[in-house]
Image: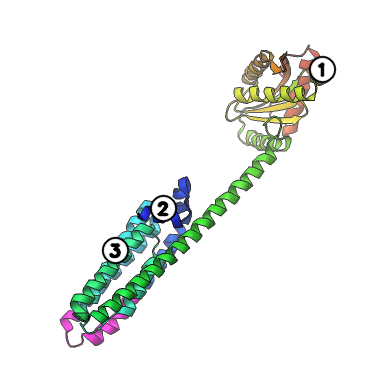
Amino acid sequence: MLQRFHSRFLVDLGEMEGDYRVFHLRDDIAQSTLYISIAMLAVLSMTRMDLLLYQSNPALFTRLMVYHGIYILISLFSIAAIRKTSKVRIYDRLMLAWLSLTVLGLLLFNFTRPANLLTTTYDVIILFAIYILSPLRISYTVALAFGFSAGTLVLDYFYKTGSDSAAFNTLITAQFIVHVLGLVSSLQIQSYRRKSFKAYIQEKDAKEMVAYLANIDSLTKSLTRRQFFNIAESEFLRFSRYHRNLSILVLDADYFKNINDTYGHYAGDLVLRNLSLVVLEQKRAQDTFGRLGGEEFGILLPETNLEQAKVVAERVQKIWAQTPCSLDGYLIYSTVSIGVAEAKKEDKTFEDVLRRADRMMYKAKEAGRNTVAANE
């Protein structure tokens, strides 16, 4: 029932629930540290009241001071523990343990008060604070609140109000109202946090999608020229710094104008899309594939020497020659000319490597197309 109530009034984050808790963990730890510190100050402030109430009973006053001291030490340990943790599960367990101890301690301290001293005002404030300040799941918070409420009512009935039913009914009414107000307030706070997190994630995803689309060629799904060059410049800097192998392939579809003139521009787009798919299937995860312009593409091969790059180029060239495009019952065969170049020590920029690969591509064209030419 509580689970249905929870899902009815709180935003369901689904698979993002874990991310939501991790996202807010540091804030929860900071707030919990503040709450525990306030609780310790409140316990210290009770020392004056205990002195006034039990000045005639030094033994009881001494025991209370010992209890206060133990509680403060445990609270300090709890602060130190939660500030060191980076796991939500451990944080929840620590906070649940501290809150349970606090609730139990408050009930025991209340039991030490004189029978004629009603603490209704403090009880409802504490009850409301449990709902508002608890960083735990709503089910844990409700359990703690009802546990504290049941304890105070039992104490008030058997130890303080006795047979005064009017006073006890007033206490029950006050507790009921605070439960309703506290639960509603807690749900509103949790709902606001969840909605804010969901809006943040949606905005983040939207920005990432815009960035992704800005870097992806809409026709071929390869990288745009700008993004390809951004990555290539970074790889070239790595080559220059660490002297790692780096090669590039420049591919150009053969007789592409004839395909457009014979079958139409839609057929040309289909050829480019299929060529891109073939390359994407053949390249490694660490390779970078982008459209340089028109029917020309580039493949950046890090950690690859010239001979290894030639193997990749020949594989792409042969597979593409055997992969026709189907259009309105026609099979359109296309080939590709590929130029291969490896970065050298004397290269100053990535453009130097690219120009050599481009020259090799034109050399492959002059050699009759559907071939691979490499800069030795």
Q: Residue at x 69, y 14 (%)?
A: 321
Q: Which of the pair 335/118 is nearer the observer? A: 118
Alpha-carbon span between mark 1 and mark 2? 64 Å
Q: Residue at x 27, y 72 (%)?
A: 106
Which residue is the site of mark 3?
100
Residue type (three-letter) at the residue carrying disc 3: Ser
Which quarter of the rendered picture does the C terminus lie within? top right
Q: Residue at x 46, y 47 (%)?
A: 14
Up-down relation of residue 96 to residue 87 (above or below): below
Do residues under tags 1 and 2 come within 8 Å of each other at their CB atoms? no
The mark that comes first in sequence, 3 or 2, is 2
Specify the farthest residue to the right: 261
Q: Which of the pair 374/188 is nearer the observer? A: 188
Query: What numbered label is drawn on residue 262?
Result: 1
Residue 39 on the magenta span: no
Alpha-carbon span between mark 3 and mark 1? 80 Å
Residue type (three-letter) at the residue carrying disc 1: Thr
- Give the residues drawn in magenta, as a range: 41-60
Q: Nearer the viewer, mark 1 or mark 2?
A: 1
Up-down relation of residue 314 to residue 1 (above or below): above
Q: Is residue 261 left or right of residue 345?
A: right
Q: Quadrant of residue 34?
A: bottom left
Which residue is the site of mark 2?
86
